Image (cartoon, rainbow, N blue to C red):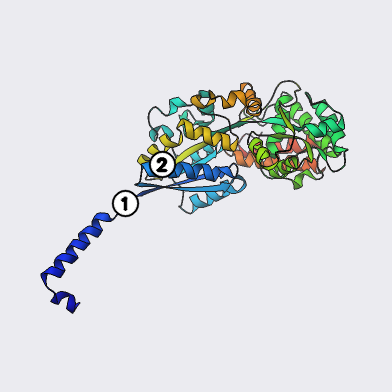
Amino acid sequence: MRKLMGRGGALLAAATTAIALSTATVPAKTTEIRFTLGEYSANTKKSFERIAEAFEKENPDIDIVIEVIPWANYLQALTTDISGNNAPDMSVVASIWLAEFSQSGLVAPIEGVISPDLKDKFIPAMLQPSYIDGELMGLPIAASARAMMINTDLYAIAGVDAPENWDQLEKASQEIGALPGTFGFGLPGKEEEVDVYFYYALWSFGGRIFDENGKSALASPEAIAAAKLYAKLVEDGATQPSPTAYSREDVFNMFKQGKVGTVFTFPMLVPQIKEEAPELNYSVLPFPVKAQKSTMAITDSVMVFESSDAKDEIQKFMDFIFEHDFRLEFNKADGLLPVMSSVVADSFYQEDKDMKAFADGLAYAQFQPNVERWDEIIDITRSALQRIYLGEQSPEDALSAAAKEIDELRGLGS
């Protein structure tokens, strides 16, 4: 220090210049947007990291932090972050979760965040599940409808036709299940969508999840008939043994391995098969019909947390991620249906027979109800179905108990 001072004004001037130069090269302060979403496939993280990188090139003062979490663990991870005052800025969530988040005051109404004309780019029906009490709380970022997928080789070996009704599905599943090393019908009995598999049959039989008074309709004749159908498939050995030991992903993996004749699935399975099991011969078909055609449409919505202090930057990012080319790339990579008008018109959805088969179901698809405490209702329904599959309770007893518990949960008990 003493030596430095001894060199006088020249050194001081040089130091001052160096400080000025270093100050001039310090980058402007950046704003971070933490964005969490569930994992649709191995392509999800790659797709969004490419989008984030492209956005950051145009907006060097904004950093996008992408966090992709398996769907099975996602809600728990998000809830933990919220409880620890560490909520992200924006998240993709199942649209059926929006009611709970909104009622808790955690979510910012989306029209107060996005550019005024962004909403107009969406297919109006796809926005429906994101409305809570008349207010738009998110934007649909992913959509799917469900359909039946069969292994055409196993059907040919068993000498059975593709089923058009539930009796034909039962017969085909029994015949394929009798082949060595194969299972007729893949039935998930744990984790996500145990209840969803049941709804396909429930709706086809003419049933409903809630009646006209808002009470649970799980004990209705249609619901009991649907549950008896699945119980008989299990009892007759037409499913894989012990369905309650298998998740949806387990069932899909067995299908990709050529071990299962029929699964009910989403379009995201198509690109997985093409990548992981290109030799598998399959066909995508409508669900079997009883009283009416049935399928389910699902949307996932991107929502913005009220606590975020980056809403201006989020508006720019929202405009970016909903550009046509990015949406189409993401949909193709993960096997998703379009939510935007420009994307649905793309030739991909008109020429790809598999995607078209899923998209055709949108004409008569139903959405899961967007009600508070829906995740608890799912747990109650899943537990009842598990007891039925395990033979611990009859469909009548299990579903009657579930309906009563759901009504009490929602304050509608008698």
Give the residue number, with chain letter if any, for mark 1: 29
Q: Does 7 sit above or below residue 380?
A: below
> Residue 67: x percent and y percent?
51, 48
Give the residue number, with chain letter if any, for mark 2: 55
Q: Which mark is residue 247?
A: none
State which quarter of the image contains the N terminus. Answer: bottom left
Residue type at mark 2 is Phe
Q: Residue at x 53, y 49 (%)?
A: 79
Q: Residue at x 80, y 45 (%)?
A: 242
> Residue 301: x percent and y percent?
51, 36
> Residue 274: x percent and y percent?
66, 38
Front residue of this view, candidates 366 and 206: 366
State which quarter of the image contains the C terminus. Answer: top right
Left-right relation of 44 to 114:
right
Front residue of this view, candidates 259 and 306: 259
Number of numbered discs on residues: 2
